[in-house]
Amino acid sequence: MIRIIGTGSYLPEKILTNKDIEKFVNTTDEWITQRTGIKERRIAREDEATSDLAYNASIKALEMAQLKPEDLELIILGTSTPDYQIPACAPIIQHRLGCKRIPAFDINSVCTSFTFAFLTAYSYIASGLYNNCLLIGADVYSKILNWKDRNSCVIFGDGGGAFVIKKDTTKKGIMSHVFGVEGSGAHQIRIPVGGSRNPLHSIEDFNKYDPKDIYFQMEGKKVYEFTLSVITGITKTLIEKSGLTKEEIDFFVFHQANIRIIDMISRVLNIPMEKFLVNIDKVGNTSSASIPIVVDEAVRSGKIKDGDKILMLGFGGGLSWGGVVFEW
């Protein structure tokens, strides 16, 4: 099936702590920490875009995989903050890496983008269409946030993460998967203005909209309640469909959205917190980059080893979710 032969991640240099945010938003370090588990996050430079973070993560993943860019056959990028509305971001990365004229495209399912991209890449390789793929998750949410909105600006950070995966018939590959969306809640995470529904073509367009509507918006309480209502069940289904017990799964890798969500799953399913990979306290919610970043940290520290069984689950805008159990 497939083997992950390389991982990489990149975080911008600038660190923004909760204490820093206290200086310009009506909030406190205690309030943020209790509600999210976040203590600090990384913020991209003014001249850093999503492709820059993705490129740097990709270079590290390729180095671990001992592959050259020209060896790649496919690139898939999960992101909801591409450099431009058009073109897609993946072709920019393909060119910068110096790859051949291989396919390169984006998938946008907000914070679930990476897991959707993972299943897509797996399907291409398992079907025999390609032998390897550079799979990336990268986002720069700092540039779409309303920094006066304390309910959203305290949550997110910027970052990029990448996997290099290749065909390997000795591996079991994906042992179970559960993907879906609840489209009736799509409006709960959105940027209302700037797309084809509410375009911005002139100064007159800017004047007819509320200035807050050009920024990221989230109905935090509703999204949180929805997540709590579905994620535990999805986790149980993934375990049952895999044919494994929860004890046989070595690590649980959830989108780093909120430590309270991970803690709740740990308590309800009686899974030790030591089995969950967590770094939200240091990097915040990096959207589609959150899973590959925390996985790369675990691989490089020697925590994840060959043959480990991993449950990986993303969730977010759409409202969407996507999870797999697979063999490392």
Image (cartoon, rainbow, N blue to C red):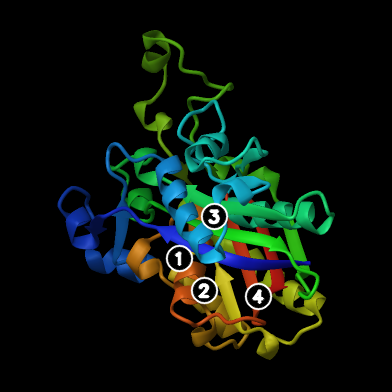
Which element is circle 4 on? loop
Which element is circle 1 on? loop
Side (left or right) of 124 relative to 156 = right
The location of residue 31, given as percent across then percent down, is 29, 65
**Quarter-of-image position of residue 215:** top left
Q: Residues within 10 Å of mark 1 (few under 14, many from 20)?
A: many
**Mark 3 → mark 2, Cα distance in angstroms:** 15 Å
Question: Residue lying furthest right in this view?
Answer: 127
The location of residue 144, given as percent across then percent down, is 39, 38
Residue that label 2 marks: 262
Does residue 234 lie above or below 84 as drawn? below
Residue that label 4 marks: 328
**Which residue is depicted at the point 51% across and 74% down?**
262
Q: Are marks 4 and 2 in contact (CB under 8 Å)?
A: no
The kind of residue tagged 4 is Trp
Does residue 49 lie above or below 201 as drawn? below
Q: Of tags 4 and 2, which is closer to the observer? A: 4
**Mark 2 → mark 1, Cα distance in angstroms:** 7 Å
The kind of residue tagged 3 is Val
**Mark 1 → mark 3, Cα distance in angstroms:** 11 Å
Does residue 206 lie above or below 193 as drawn? above
Residue that label 1 marks: 258
Residue that label 3 marks: 223
